[in-house]
Image: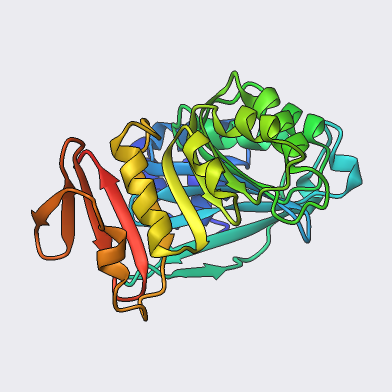
Amino acid sequence: MTTFPILLLPPKCLHHTLKSMKHMDFIYFSFASKKCMNHAIDVNIKTTSLNMGCIQSPDYIVVEATFKDRQSAGFHVNTDMHLTAGGDRDCSEQISPMETTYNADGRLMRSAPEYRKMPKITLHELIEHFLVLVHRPRIQYLSFKNCMLDLNSISEIFKGFPIGILNISAERYDSNENTFYSQILHNFADQTEQFAIEYGGIFHNRQQIHELLARDLHCVVFTKMAPSSLQIVNATRIVLDFQVEPQFLNEFIKLWQRGSNPRMKYFQARVDVKNEQCGSQILNGVETFSFEEYGRRAKGKTARIFLRKNGLFKMYVGV
Protein backbone atom coordinates (compact mmCIF):
# COMPACT_ATOMS: atom_id res chain seq x y z
CA MET A 1 0.00 0.00 0.00
CA THR A 2 1.22 3.53 -0.77
CA THR A 3 2.61 5.76 2.00
CA PHE A 4 0.90 8.80 0.46
CA PRO A 5 -0.99 10.83 3.16
CA ILE A 6 -4.36 9.84 1.75
CA LEU A 7 -6.40 11.57 4.45
CA LEU A 8 -5.10 14.97 3.25
CA LEU A 9 -6.98 14.58 -0.04
CA PRO A 10 -10.10 16.71 -0.62
CA PRO A 11 -13.29 14.82 0.35
CA LYS A 12 -14.36 14.02 -3.22
CA CYS A 13 -10.88 12.85 -4.20
CA LEU A 14 -10.63 10.71 -1.05
CA HIS A 15 -14.02 9.16 -1.76
CA HIS A 16 -12.99 8.31 -5.34
CA THR A 17 -9.62 6.94 -4.22
CA LEU A 18 -11.17 4.64 -1.62
CA LYS A 19 -13.75 3.41 -4.10
CA SER A 20 -10.98 2.57 -6.60
CA MET A 21 -8.86 0.61 -4.13
CA LYS A 22 -8.34 -3.11 -4.33
CA HIS A 23 -10.67 -4.86 -1.91
CA MET A 24 -7.93 -6.01 0.44
CA ASP A 25 -6.35 -2.54 0.53
CA PHE A 26 -9.76 -1.05 1.32
CA ILE A 27 -10.30 -3.48 4.19
CA TYR A 28 -6.86 -2.79 5.65
CA PHE A 29 -7.47 0.95 5.38
CA SER A 30 -10.62 0.62 7.47
CA PHE A 31 -8.60 -0.92 10.32
CA ALA A 32 -6.03 1.91 10.42
CA SER A 33 -8.06 4.19 12.74
CA LYS A 34 -11.60 5.17 13.68
CA LYS A 35 -11.36 8.07 11.25
CA CYS A 36 -10.35 5.72 8.45
CA MET A 37 -13.22 3.40 9.32
CA ASN A 38 -15.71 6.26 9.13
CA HIS A 39 -14.38 7.29 5.71
CA ALA A 40 -14.60 3.65 4.52
CA ILE A 41 -18.19 3.36 5.73
CA ASP A 42 -19.13 6.57 3.88
CA VAL A 43 -17.93 5.04 0.59
CA ASN A 44 -20.80 2.54 0.92
CA ILE A 45 -19.04 -0.30 -0.87
CA LYS A 46 -21.58 -2.87 -2.11
CA THR A 47 -21.21 -6.56 -1.31
CA THR A 48 -23.37 -9.54 -2.18
CA SER A 49 -22.67 -11.48 1.02
CA LEU A 50 -20.58 -11.78 4.17
CA ASN A 51 -19.62 -15.40 4.82
CA MET A 52 -17.78 -17.04 7.69
CA GLY A 53 -16.68 -20.52 8.61
CA CYS A 54 -15.16 -22.52 11.45
CA ILE A 55 -13.01 -25.26 9.96
CA GLN A 56 -10.91 -28.09 11.39
CA SER A 57 -7.40 -29.31 10.50
CA PRO A 58 -5.94 -26.89 11.08
CA ASP A 59 -8.51 -25.08 13.20
CA TYR A 60 -9.24 -21.64 11.85
CA ILE A 61 -12.08 -19.18 11.36
CA VAL A 62 -12.70 -17.50 7.99
CA VAL A 63 -14.26 -14.03 7.66
CA GLU A 64 -14.81 -13.13 4.00
CA ALA A 65 -16.86 -10.53 2.13
CA THR A 66 -17.95 -11.10 -1.48
CA PHE A 67 -18.14 -7.98 -3.63
CA LYS A 68 -20.21 -7.06 -6.67
CA ASP A 69 -17.35 -7.95 -9.04
CA ARG A 70 -17.47 -11.59 -7.82
CA GLN A 71 -14.22 -11.20 -5.90
CA SER A 72 -13.91 -11.93 -2.19
CA ALA A 73 -11.51 -10.61 0.42
CA GLY A 74 -11.07 -11.11 4.12
CA PHE A 75 -9.05 -13.00 6.72
CA HIS A 76 -8.54 -16.43 8.15
CA VAL A 77 -7.73 -16.56 11.85
CA ASN A 78 -5.74 -19.43 13.33
CA THR A 79 -7.56 -20.50 16.47
CA ASP A 80 -5.21 -21.90 19.09
CA MET A 81 -6.38 -22.72 22.60
CA HIS A 82 -6.29 -19.18 23.98
CA LEU A 83 -8.88 -18.08 21.41
CA THR A 84 -11.53 -20.54 22.55
CA ALA A 85 -12.58 -18.48 25.57
CA GLY A 86 -15.41 -16.75 23.76
CA GLY A 87 -13.30 -14.76 21.31
CA ASP A 88 -12.65 -11.96 23.81
CA ARG A 89 -8.84 -11.98 23.51
CA ASP A 90 -6.58 -10.29 21.02
CA CYS A 91 -6.23 -12.31 17.79
CA SER A 92 -4.30 -9.76 15.70
CA GLU A 93 -1.18 -11.96 15.54
CA GLN A 94 -3.19 -14.91 14.18
CA ILE A 95 -4.85 -13.02 11.31
CA SER A 96 -3.78 -13.66 7.69
CA PRO A 97 -5.28 -11.99 4.58
CA MET A 98 -6.99 -13.97 1.85
CA GLU A 99 -8.54 -13.17 -1.53
CA THR A 100 -10.77 -15.24 -3.81
CA THR A 101 -11.53 -14.66 -7.49
CA TYR A 102 -14.29 -16.47 -9.37
CA ASN A 103 -13.29 -17.26 -12.95
CA ALA A 104 -15.77 -17.15 -15.82
CA ASP A 105 -16.12 -20.94 -15.59
CA GLY A 106 -17.09 -20.66 -11.92
CA ARG A 107 -13.84 -22.02 -10.47
CA LEU A 108 -12.28 -20.45 -7.39
CA MET A 109 -8.79 -18.98 -7.42
CA ARG A 110 -7.47 -18.28 -3.91
CA SER A 111 -4.45 -16.14 -3.15
CA ALA A 112 -2.65 -14.82 -0.07
CA PRO A 113 -2.00 -11.07 -0.29
CA GLU A 114 0.91 -9.42 1.47
CA TYR A 115 0.60 -9.61 5.26
CA ARG A 116 0.23 -6.31 7.11
CA LYS A 117 0.23 -5.72 10.82
CA MET A 118 -3.22 -5.43 12.36
CA PRO A 119 -4.23 -3.42 15.43
CA LYS A 120 -5.24 -5.37 18.52
CA ILE A 121 -8.69 -6.82 17.97
CA THR A 122 -10.83 -9.71 19.23
CA LEU A 123 -12.67 -12.18 17.02
CA HIS A 124 -16.01 -10.71 18.05
CA GLU A 125 -14.80 -7.21 17.18
CA LEU A 126 -13.43 -8.43 13.84
CA ILE A 127 -16.82 -9.80 12.82
CA GLU A 128 -18.62 -6.66 13.98
CA HIS A 129 -16.13 -4.51 12.02
CA PHE A 130 -16.89 -6.38 8.79
CA LEU A 131 -20.65 -6.18 9.23
CA VAL A 132 -20.49 -2.42 9.69
CA LEU A 133 -17.87 -1.85 6.97
CA VAL A 134 -19.77 -3.64 4.19
CA HIS A 135 -23.25 -2.60 5.35
CA ARG A 136 -24.57 -6.11 5.92
CA PRO A 137 -27.43 -6.66 8.37
CA ARG A 138 -26.33 -10.23 9.06
CA ILE A 139 -23.80 -12.97 8.38
CA GLN A 140 -25.19 -14.40 5.16
CA TYR A 141 -23.63 -17.86 5.55
CA LEU A 142 -21.85 -19.42 8.52
CA SER A 143 -20.46 -22.94 8.30
CA PHE A 144 -19.10 -25.37 10.87
CA LYS A 145 -17.00 -27.99 9.09
CA ASN A 146 -15.90 -30.62 11.62
CA CYS A 147 -15.07 -27.79 13.99
CA MET A 148 -13.37 -29.15 17.10
CA LEU A 149 -13.42 -25.92 19.11
CA ASP A 150 -15.56 -25.65 22.22
CA LEU A 151 -19.09 -24.95 20.96
CA ASN A 152 -20.03 -22.75 23.90
CA SER A 153 -17.02 -20.55 23.17
CA ILE A 154 -17.86 -20.48 19.47
CA SER A 155 -21.40 -19.36 20.24
CA GLU A 156 -19.97 -16.53 22.34
CA ILE A 157 -17.86 -15.37 19.39
CA PHE A 158 -20.97 -15.04 17.19
CA LYS A 159 -23.33 -13.93 19.96
CA GLY A 160 -25.69 -11.16 18.87
CA PHE A 161 -24.96 -11.44 15.14
CA PRO A 162 -27.96 -12.36 12.93
CA ILE A 163 -27.21 -15.37 10.68
CA GLY A 164 -28.94 -16.18 7.40
CA ILE A 165 -27.93 -19.83 6.87
CA LEU A 166 -25.93 -21.90 9.35
CA ASN A 167 -24.42 -24.97 7.69
CA ILE A 168 -23.27 -27.76 10.02
CA SER A 169 -21.11 -30.79 9.24
CA ALA A 170 -20.02 -33.39 11.81
CA GLU A 171 -18.85 -35.88 9.21
CA ARG A 172 -15.55 -36.72 10.91
CA TYR A 173 -16.90 -36.99 14.43
CA ASP A 174 -16.49 -40.38 16.09
CA SER A 175 -19.15 -39.60 18.69
CA ASN A 176 -22.90 -39.32 18.21
CA GLU A 177 -23.70 -36.61 15.67
CA ASN A 178 -26.88 -35.76 17.53
CA THR A 179 -24.92 -34.24 20.43
CA PHE A 180 -23.01 -31.94 18.09
CA TYR A 181 -26.05 -30.91 16.05
CA SER A 182 -28.32 -30.43 19.06
CA GLN A 183 -25.81 -28.16 20.79
CA ILE A 184 -25.48 -25.92 17.76
CA LEU A 185 -29.20 -25.83 17.05
CA HIS A 186 -29.81 -24.91 20.69
CA ASN A 187 -27.04 -22.28 20.92
CA PHE A 188 -27.88 -20.55 17.62
CA ALA A 189 -31.66 -20.98 17.39
CA ASP A 190 -32.57 -17.40 18.32
CA GLN A 191 -30.24 -15.70 15.81
CA THR A 192 -30.40 -18.03 12.79
CA GLU A 193 -33.00 -17.94 10.02
CA GLN A 194 -32.21 -21.31 8.40
CA PHE A 195 -30.19 -24.39 9.33
CA ALA A 196 -28.51 -26.78 6.90
CA ILE A 197 -26.88 -30.03 8.03
CA GLU A 198 -24.73 -32.78 6.53
CA TYR A 199 -26.09 -35.96 8.09
CA GLY A 200 -24.12 -39.20 8.25
CA GLY A 201 -26.56 -41.26 10.29
CA ILE A 202 -24.59 -41.79 13.51
CA PHE A 203 -27.60 -41.96 15.82
CA HIS A 204 -28.51 -44.40 18.56
CA ASN A 205 -32.28 -44.56 18.07
CA ARG A 206 -35.11 -43.45 15.82
CA GLN A 207 -36.29 -40.79 18.27
CA GLN A 208 -32.98 -38.94 17.94
CA ILE A 209 -33.26 -39.05 14.15
CA HIS A 210 -36.82 -37.73 14.24
CA GLU A 211 -36.02 -34.90 16.65
CA LEU A 212 -33.29 -33.60 14.35
CA LEU A 213 -34.70 -34.17 10.87
CA ALA A 214 -38.24 -33.02 11.75
CA ARG A 215 -36.97 -29.50 12.50
CA ASP A 216 -37.61 -26.71 9.99
CA LEU A 217 -34.27 -27.12 8.23
CA HIS A 218 -33.12 -25.29 5.10
CA CYS A 219 -31.14 -28.21 3.70
CA VAL A 220 -30.11 -31.75 4.63
CA VAL A 221 -27.22 -33.46 2.84
CA PHE A 222 -27.19 -37.20 3.54
CA THR A 223 -23.81 -38.90 3.31
CA LYS A 224 -25.53 -42.16 4.30
CA MET A 225 -29.00 -42.97 5.57
CA ALA A 226 -31.72 -45.50 6.28
CA PRO A 227 -34.51 -45.24 3.66
CA SER A 228 -37.10 -44.55 6.35
CA SER A 229 -35.20 -41.41 7.42
CA LEU A 230 -36.05 -39.62 4.18
CA GLN A 231 -39.78 -39.42 4.96
CA ILE A 232 -39.05 -37.63 8.24
CA VAL A 233 -37.08 -34.78 6.69
CA ASN A 234 -38.77 -31.39 7.00
CA ALA A 235 -36.29 -29.44 4.85
CA THR A 236 -36.67 -27.34 1.72
CA ARG A 237 -33.60 -28.90 0.07
CA ILE A 238 -32.66 -32.60 0.29
CA VAL A 239 -29.45 -33.99 -1.21
CA LEU A 240 -28.38 -37.64 -1.19
CA ASP A 241 -24.61 -37.64 -1.62
CA PHE A 242 -24.42 -41.29 -2.65
CA GLN A 243 -25.83 -43.60 -5.32
CA VAL A 244 -29.35 -45.02 -4.94
CA GLU A 245 -31.42 -47.57 -6.84
CA PRO A 246 -34.06 -46.39 -9.37
CA GLN A 247 -36.74 -48.19 -7.34
CA PHE A 248 -35.81 -46.04 -4.33
CA LEU A 249 -36.48 -42.86 -6.31
CA ASN A 250 -39.68 -44.32 -7.72
CA GLU A 251 -41.01 -44.97 -4.23
CA PHE A 252 -39.88 -41.55 -3.03
CA ILE A 253 -41.75 -39.74 -5.84
CA LYS A 254 -44.92 -41.70 -5.10
CA LEU A 255 -44.69 -40.92 -1.38
CA TRP A 256 -44.11 -37.26 -2.18
CA GLN A 257 -47.23 -37.21 -4.39
CA ARG A 258 -49.18 -38.62 -1.45
CA GLY A 259 -48.00 -35.83 0.86
CA SER A 260 -44.57 -36.66 2.31
CA ASN A 261 -41.86 -33.98 2.57
CA PRO A 262 -44.35 -31.09 2.15
CA ARG A 263 -41.73 -28.30 2.52
CA MET A 264 -39.35 -29.76 -0.07
CA LYS A 265 -38.45 -27.48 -2.99
CA TYR A 266 -35.42 -29.37 -4.33
CA PHE A 267 -34.22 -32.98 -4.27
CA GLN A 268 -30.99 -34.48 -5.63
CA ALA A 269 -29.53 -37.98 -5.83
CA ARG A 270 -27.32 -40.12 -8.06
CA VAL A 271 -28.18 -43.32 -9.94
CA ASP A 272 -26.30 -45.80 -12.14
CA VAL A 273 -27.14 -44.74 -15.70
CA LYS A 274 -25.42 -47.84 -17.07
CA ASN A 275 -28.76 -49.48 -16.29
CA GLU A 276 -30.67 -48.88 -19.54
CA GLN A 277 -34.00 -49.24 -17.73
CA CYS A 278 -33.09 -46.61 -15.14
CA GLY A 279 -35.38 -43.85 -16.43
CA SER A 280 -38.43 -46.08 -16.87
CA GLN A 281 -37.88 -47.70 -13.45
CA ILE A 282 -37.81 -44.27 -11.77
CA LEU A 283 -41.10 -43.23 -13.40
CA ASN A 284 -42.81 -46.63 -13.28
CA GLY A 285 -46.40 -46.09 -12.17
CA VAL A 286 -45.93 -42.33 -11.76
CA GLU A 287 -48.50 -40.27 -13.66
CA THR A 288 -46.51 -37.78 -15.71
CA PHE A 289 -46.59 -35.96 -18.99
CA SER A 290 -43.73 -34.62 -21.09
CA PHE A 291 -42.33 -31.28 -19.92
CA GLU A 292 -39.62 -29.88 -22.17
CA GLU A 293 -36.88 -32.06 -23.59
CA TYR A 294 -35.18 -33.02 -20.35
CA GLY A 295 -37.96 -32.93 -17.78
CA ARG A 296 -41.19 -34.41 -16.50
CA ARG A 297 -44.02 -32.86 -14.56
CA ALA A 298 -45.88 -34.91 -11.97
CA LYS A 299 -49.65 -34.46 -11.99
CA GLY A 300 -51.37 -33.13 -8.87
CA LYS A 301 -48.18 -31.65 -7.47
CA THR A 302 -46.04 -29.66 -9.86
CA ALA A 303 -42.41 -30.72 -10.22
CA ARG A 304 -39.74 -30.86 -12.87
CA ILE A 305 -37.69 -34.05 -12.86
CA PHE A 306 -34.33 -34.33 -14.60
CA LEU A 307 -32.02 -37.31 -15.15
CA ARG A 308 -28.65 -36.24 -16.51
CA LYS A 309 -26.29 -38.38 -18.56
CA ASN A 310 -23.87 -38.53 -15.61
CA GLY A 311 -26.53 -40.12 -13.39
CA LEU A 312 -27.49 -36.97 -11.51
CA PHE A 313 -31.20 -36.95 -10.65
CA LYS A 314 -32.79 -33.59 -9.81
CA MET A 315 -36.31 -32.64 -8.79
CA TYR A 316 -37.57 -29.06 -8.61
CA VAL A 317 -40.92 -28.62 -6.88
CA GLY A 318 -43.40 -25.91 -7.78
CA VAL A 319 -41.57 -24.57 -10.86
Residue found 53% across the figure and 33% down from its top: 131
Residue found 36% across the figure and 66% down from its top: 312
Q: Depth check: 137 or 178 in front?
A: 178
115 left or right of 217 in image: right
Q: Identify the image's colour scheme: rainbow, by chain, secondary structure or one colour.
A: rainbow
Q: Position of residue 12 (x, y in %)?
A: 32, 39
In the displayed structure, 206 sits above or below 176; it is: above
Looking at the rendering, in which quadrant would you find the C terminus? top left
235 left or right of 297 in image: right
Q: Depth check: 187 or 302 in front?
A: 302
Q: Is residue 121 visible?
A: no
Q: Position of residue 119 (x, y in %)?
A: 73, 42
Residue found 70% across the figure and 48% down from its top: 170
Looking at the rendering, in which quadrant would you find the N terminus? bottom right
Query: Hey, which residue is sitting farthest bottom in the picture?
Result: 274
Residue found 72% across the figure and 51% down from its top: 146
Q: Position of residue 212 (x, y in %)?
A: 62, 32
**Numbered disc total:** 0
Hey, which quadrant is residue 81 in on the image? top right
Q: Position of residue 65 (x, y in %)?
A: 49, 47
Query: Hey, which residue is sitting farthest right in the picture?
Result: 82
109 left or right of 306 in image: right
Query: Hey, which residue is sitting farthest front in the picture?
Result: 285
Q: Is residue 86 visible?
A: yes
